[in-house]
Image (cartoon, helix red, strand yellow):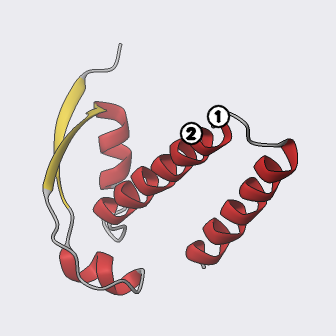
Amino acid sequence: MDRVVMIYICLNTYSYSELVKLPKKKMVHFNITLPEKLLLEMKEHPEVNWSRVAARAFEKHLKAEKLLQMLAEPGISDEDAANKVIETRRKLIMNAT
C-alpha cells in the first residue's frame, strides 16, 4: 500500500501568467495529497513546474464540467450540443499551443 504524503503547491504568478500569456492574476497557495510514489517520481523531474501542471489540469477539468453543465441544459438540441462540444474543443486546442 502506498503511503500518502502532503505536497504544498505554490502557484507562481510570474511563470504561470507569462507561459500561458495571461495578465497576471492573484495566485493562492493550495495543498493537495499525493501518493508517496507519485511524489518521488515528480522529484525526478525538477525541471517541470508542477504548480503550472496542476493549475492547467484543474482548468481543463473545470472546462469539462462547465461543458457538461451546458449540455445538460433543458431544451438544448442535439445540434446545439454538438456545436458547443466542437467550439469548446477548438478553444482547448488553441489554448494548449
Q: Quick check: marks 2 and 1 in contact, CB under 8 Å?
A: yes
For this orientation, the residue located farthest to the right is 79
The image shows residue 79, relative to residue 74, as above or below, that is: below
**Residue at image point 43% right, 60% down:** 56
Find residue 92 and report its horizontal and vertical position in percent: 62, 66
Tell me the distance, in whole angstroms, between the alpha carbons under discs 2 and 1: 5 Å
Figure quadrant of the C terminus = bottom right
Give the total number of marks visible in the rendering: 2
Residue under pointer 1: 72
Nearer to the camera, 61 or 38:
61
**Quadrant in the picture for residue 39:** top left
Q: Residues within 10 Å of mark 2 (few under 14, many from 20)?
A: few
Figure quadrant of the N terminus = top left
**Residue at image point 33% right, 86% down:** 18
Find residue 6 and report its horizontal and vertical position in percent: 17, 35
Task: Residue type at mark 2: give it.
Answer: Gln
Task: Residue type at mark 1: give it.
Answer: Ala
For this orientation, the residue located farthest to the front is 75
The image shows residue 65, relative to residue 12, as above or below, that is: above
Find residue 58 and report its horizontal and vertical position in percent: 40, 51
Residue under pointer 2: 69
Q: Is residue 50 left or right of residue 8?
A: right
